[in-house]
Image (cartoon, helix red, strand yellow):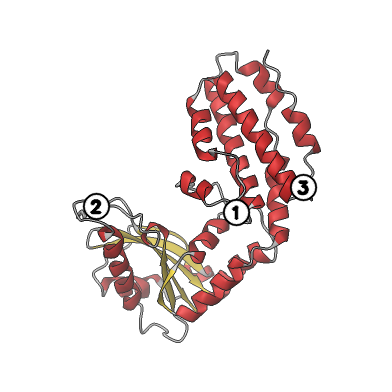
Amino acid sequence: MKLTSDSALPGHSAAHERRRIAQRVADGHRGLDDSSLLAFVSGSVVDDLADERSDVDMSVVLAELPTADVLQAAAARVGGTPWFWSQGELAEGGAVVAFHVDGIEVQIGYATHAALQDQVDELLLRHNPDTPLHKLAEGILKAEPLFGQRPLQALQHRLAAFPPELALAMGRHFVATPTPWRALSQIVHRDAALWCREIFVDASYRLLGLLAAVNRRYFTRFQVKRMHRFAAGLAHVPPDFADRVEAVLKADPLPAARQLLALEAQTFDLVADHLPGVDLTAARARHAQFKPD
């Protein structure tokens, strides 16, 4: 629960205030190991989209992570409260923690340099098509340095070179799970609205994943936000994609299924044009099974 509010402040003041807090928190970690310290802020703050509900999304990377009490002391030096939430194990190379500074939530992803490089390698070398690490990659690409500008730029340079092998792996992954069009032909006429919505949501995520692959963009369905902004940044995308996905989720089952069918067909055409290594034969055959009439 927020202890203060900057909702009445004009312009980009919410983002500015959170940048200021992020820098304070980064400075609080000075002296632990300045030779290896890397700190950066990302999320809505760097997009200048932060509002009074936004937290501070930042990362702190060191050669070796200290114990929890040392890191809590680093935050306390700049007015941070004790951690009220944490996940992961510092001794294993990484954890995410949360606390408040001036009533604003701060979330820090702690990692060793070795662990962070391994996470980046999971995408760039091992080409994992479906992992929350895609969210980390997107965050690093737009991050602003707080300490350690050169290592951040090196990471950004690596991640900006999106591997074609990863795009192909993503395309194959997101097309592999079928949308059950034959079953939908029947259940859109039944008392099965909840089941239909589940299918529509899952199918919409898969279409987003396919479009990310086509456009060489990192993507995970984990905590998807600002879908319109994401779709607007794609060079190859069906017209009004985000609006049409929202319409699918709001419409009655039969018209929603028909709208989704059209979106899927257009997305498959883009995959065929830009990722010819993805075999769409089975997916198109399933697509043709929707015959509700």
Residue 42, horizontal then vertical, whole percent: 42, 63
Number of marks present in the image shown: 3
Residue 173, horizontal then vertical, whole percent: 70, 47
Residue 9 found in image quarter: bottom left
4 left or right of 87 in image: left
The residue that mark 2 highlights is 2
Instruction: For marks 1 and 3, give the CA distance.
Output: 20 Å
278 left or right of 219 in image: right
The residue that mark 3 highlights is 278
Identify which amino acid the numbered label 3 is placed on: Val
Identify which amino acid the numbered label 1 is placed on: Thr
| Tag nearer the camera, 2 or 3 | 3
The residue that mark 1 highlights is 131
Residue 236, horizontal then vertical, whole percent: 62, 48
Instruction: For marks 2 and 3, give the CA distance.
Output: 47 Å
Identify which amino acid the numbered label 2 is placed on: Lys
